[in-house]
Amino acid sequence: MYLGLDIGTSAIKAVLVDDAQSVIATAETPLAISRPQPGFSEQSPEDWWQATLASIDTLKAEQPKALAAVRGIGLSGQMHGAVLLDAFGKVLRPAILWNDGRSSAECRELEERFPALHQVAGNLAFPGFTAPKLMWVRKHEPDLFARMAKVLLPKAYVGFRLTGEMVEEMSDASGTLWLDVGRRDWSDEALAATGMSREHMPRLVEGSAAAGRIKPELAARWGMENPPVLAGGAGDNAAGAIGLGAIGANDAFVSLGTSGVLWATTDRYAPNPQSSVHAFCHAIPATWHQMGVILSAASALGWWANVAKEAPGDLLAPLGDAPKAPSRATFLPYLSGERTPHNDTAIRAAFVGMDHDTGRDELTQAVLEGVSFAFKDCLDALSAAGTRLTQADVIGGGSRSRFWIAVLASVLGIPLNRVEDGERGGAFGAARLARMAATGESPAEICLPPRRLETIEPDPVLQQAYAERHALYKALYPALKGVTS
């Protein structure tokens, strides 16, 4: 029996997985986000810990025998967040999250101080990444920075509370800008550029390797026969890839979660930061990946549902299974700025092209299409980086909508696969990593792909129509930037 924990932004999710890789129980505890100023986004690490305890306690109440038999625990987590600890392991301030935009100036400073950053770290300096956040703290909270002894990412902090060990793995570490992604080791030069050193960093392991054992008192709390092994784990997207079996070169998926990801597994380090493509380590050895990332995917539909005062499912129901033509309205989904390909934290969203006859259904379709056009920007950026995708699986909450997948297939021009359990997310992948850490089994043995329920092909007529709409979408960005940035 294996336990996967996903340290997300909106909730802590826990899954129990048996030896046949069947999910036998799940639990979820919600989280809140604090936004103390415009563009700021923070959470209390203690909230993650209490929600983790609550989720596992729920599993104990529902499946005490299964939980007692757990041999390994794996962690998936929201990436890039900065947890600052003092010399006694105490949290110094609320964690600054992945969608926090305060450190744009520090990104420019970091690239000036360390010109080799793009090649070493494989990425542009985005405000969401961890290193610029620490530069902001050093500048604006110098006394606190001076007291800082360690910096942990969100899931590593939960791992610290579980084991007492400060450990990070390669996929999450890739999103800090402190990792030499090709060498899979901390970069002394990148650390020095932010006024830090290896002493501030946790030790590194591969995601499928053991990172420690659960504290005996916690194992006793949950009735576990022996303290389970804790795996290195994975950043949320890498954990999703492990859950999908996306471990071979050119395996690809689209994640329609709160944010959106277009993922391609690679067998080598292949950076191309000029296209705002992320090049990260995978959570298994000798494997990397490229990603295009958009900051608002399913959350854009959630925002529109809130404005329309309807549940997302009620908005989608009238649309049917596939579009007949593009919406006459165009939506640019920049509610939180955008990452790929623009690296623009200041840009904001807009509807364009409405008239007196524009109704709710047409605007709902426009939201789905706008997010899909943002994914097309990601696909073009990956193509510029030398990666050609021929198909992809679709996961995340948005994968429930066949209509949305049909739109996305025609916009991207590639077949998309609806898969079984497409919403189970990072926690299932974390449980697979836990099993590998506990048993020594290989990724090829454990990371099997899910059953594909349906392949949705691009509609040739819609493909051409959407190509024209995407050209309009791209032309609107510079005009919108002139009035919102």
Image: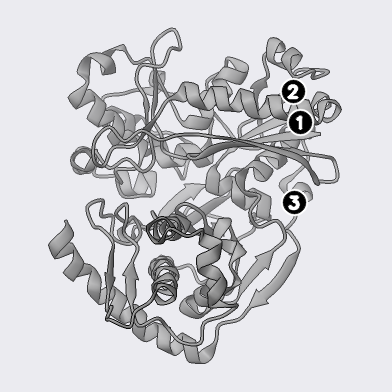
Q: Amino acid at mark 1?
A: Ala
Mark 1: secondary structure: helix
Left or right of 191 in this view: 437:
right
The C terminus - image quarter: bottom left
Q: Nearer the viewer, mark 1 or mark 3?
A: 1
Residue under label 1, please give it.
438
Q: Amino acid at mark 3?
A: Ala
Rendered image: mark on residue 228: 2
Mark 3: secondary structure: helix
Q: Provide residue 115's location: percent of width, then percent of height.
A: 24, 44
Q: Provide residue 314's location: percent of width, then percent of height.
A: 54, 65
Q: Tell me the residue at 40%/81% (across/down).
A: 327
Q: Quadrant of residue 296?
A: bottom left
Q: Amino acid at mark 2?
A: Pro
Which of the two labelled residues, at mark 2 and mark 1, occupies the earlier sequence position?
A: 2
Residue toward you, 331 or 440: 331
Determine the residue located farthest toward the left in the rendered image.
Answer: 482
Q: Are marks 2 and 1 in contact (CB under 8 Å)?
A: yes
Rendered image: mark on residue 444: 3
Left or right of 300 in this view: 113:
left
Q: Is residue 187 visible?
A: yes
Give above or below for 266 relative to 237: below
